[in-house]
Image (cartoon, helix red, strand yellow):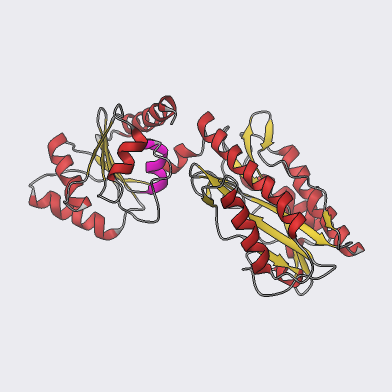
Amino acid sequence: MDTEAMAARVARLRGLMVERGYDAVILRNNPDLRWLTGAERTFDFESAHTAYITADRLYLHTDSRYYNTFLERLGSDSPWIIDQDRATAPAWAALHVARERSRVVAVEDSLTLDFFDELQDQLRRAGVAALLPRMHGDICNLRMVKDAEELRLLQAAQDVTDAAFEHICSYIRPGMTEKQIRAELEGWMLSNGADALSFDSIIASGPNGANPHAQPSDRRVAEGDLIVMDYGAVVGDYHADMTRTVCLGEPSSKQREVYDVVQRAHEECAAMARAGMVGAELHQHSVDVISEAGFGAYFGHGLGHGVGLEIHERPGFSPAWDKPVPAGSVVTIEPGIYLPGEFGIRLEDCGVVDEKGYHPFTRSPHALRVIAV
């Protein structure tokens, strides 16, 4: 764990607290807690942890399932004060509000209502008056700008993902089902450096590829099929995200034509991308390229999304992101064309944006990969 990086992240949060006039913040969102603590491979699907952060203290509440892991991950010199008090998380937070004499305590707007209601009730019982302003994604906004440690882990995750692409291309044969291909792909990643999977892998062949988020089925791949593969490895809690479309045997002229349009849209957008540009504007360029080729009706999703501790996070190259993309953001570029009843094509890289341009972690080539049969 890079202790200097963790200290810098906490300092960024505390700078926000000073700017907003917060005495403390209460955090429960696991990706935010992972970002601030640096505790790798500790957080899972449970909402089992609560942080109480002041100008000079870092408190973390957990339970017996995670307590020893936190101690091991963070070490004896950690600034985090960790406990497994049997009080409920809201009661624990209310106790710290009282002890620290905090008067303005910010909470995430992603807190569950039952937590928030019990927190208010506990404060009333203790006779403590505190303002509880909401933070509307403030930590998510801080997390947009990745530091060197995060970029290292993102590249490591992508390296496993790229290697998996070479493996799966050598494995695929006519007659295999989409589910078989997915099992081989995911098993290979988990056996070759991945701590986990970024999401349920998409393997969509032939007409199934026209559904951007198709789930692998029992359909058997056949010669002439385009196969869309969207997947990623996780390393140190950071996600990779890549899509490649391959052809089993020689593609038709139409398949080549559509693939060339998608590749052109991708590469033009990648060449244009840089920090400070509005995400929606880059998305619009991809729409323009695909529309001019006559396929505008068949590209309906955003060009790209942020990636990091979550597979979808801020910012984005999409119509919804009407703000400049900050330097240090990690964003996908993934145009696609989806022809119902025929086939789909998507080409996705993930990379970091700075003032000079877009720098992909992805190393797998963009040219259409033809798998010999």
Q: Is residue 289 visible?
A: yes
- Relative to 218, is 132 above or below? above
| Horizontal arrangement in the rendering, residue 129 relative to residue 341 (left or right) | left
Give the residue at x 45% y 43%.
Answer: 140
Q: Quadrant of residue 300?
A: bottom right
| Horizontal arrangement in the rendering, residue 137 relative to residue 369 (left or right) | left
Along the line of sight, the residue nearer the viewer: 129 or 126: 126
Q: Is residue 163 magenta?
A: no
Give the residue at x 32% y 40%.
Answer: 70
- Relative to 140, is 13 above or below? above
| Horizontal arrangement in the rendering, residue 324 relative to residue 371 (left or right) | left
Q: Position of residue 192 (x, y in %)?
A: 60, 47
Q: Position of residue 130 (x, y in %)?
A: 18, 43
Along the line of sight, the residue nearer the viewer: 158 or 269: 158
Please identify the quadrant where the C terminus is shown: bottom right
Q: Furthest-front residue in view?
A: 191
Secondary structure of the magenta portion, mostly? helix
Please identify the quadrant where the N terminus is shown: top left
Magenta part of the chain? 29-37
Q: Is residue 202 visible?
A: no
Give the residue at x 56% y 42%.
Answer: 323
Q: Position of residue 115 (x, y in %)?
A: 25, 56
- Relative to 97, is 182 above or below? below
Give the residue at x 30% y 52%.
Answer: 48
Q: Furthest-top residue in view?
A: 4
Question: What is the tally of numbered marks visible in this picture?
Answer: 0
Q: Position of residue 366 (x, y in %)?
A: 78, 47
Q: Quadrant of residue 255?
A: bottom right
